[in-house]
Amino acid sequence: MQVRINGKERELPESTTLLQLLQERGIDPRIVVVEYNYEILPRERYAEITLREGDNLEIVQMTAGG
């Protein structure tokens, strides 16, 4: 299935959850904010969101510094 991640089309297996996507990419879900189809999701929902064809994700990693 095709989804858009940070503006780029990506091919993912069917039934991939948002949490699986993050884990497979080596992204710690505790340090990112995810916008799913233009809605910012609470981290508790990452495991229950199953991605679908045409979904749009923006994944923003928080960094420390100054």
Image: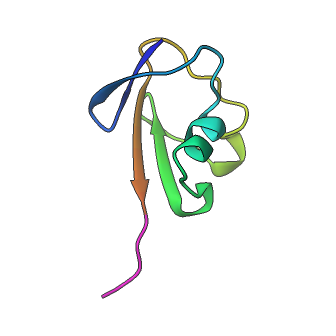
- Residue depicted at 50% across the width and 21% down the height: 12
- At horizontal 49% and vertical 53% (from top left) the residue drawn is 33
Q: Name above or below for residue 66 compared with residue 22.
A: below
Residue 61 colored magenta? no
- On the image, the x and y values in percent for residue 18 come to 60, 35
Image quadrant holding the C terminus, namely bottom left
Q: Which span is picked out in magenta? A: 62-66
How would you classify the magenta stretch by its main secondary structure? loop
- From this viewpoint, which residue is outermost toward the bottom? 66
**In the image, 24: left or right of 39?**
right
Q: Residue furthest left?
A: 7
Q: Residue at x 58, y 41 (%)?
A: 24
Q: Is residue 41 above or below residue 10?
A: below
Q: Nearer the viewer, residue 15 or 26?
A: 26
- Which color scheme did the rendering employ for the protein? rainbow
Splitting the image into 4 quarters, where does residue 29 fall? bottom right
Q: Position of residue 34 (x, y in %)?
A: 49, 45
The relative height of residue 53 versus residue 64 in the rendered view (above or below) is above
Q: Is residue 52 left or right of residue 19?
A: left
How far across and down, in percent of the image, does residue 28 sit? 59, 58
19 to the left or right of 35: right
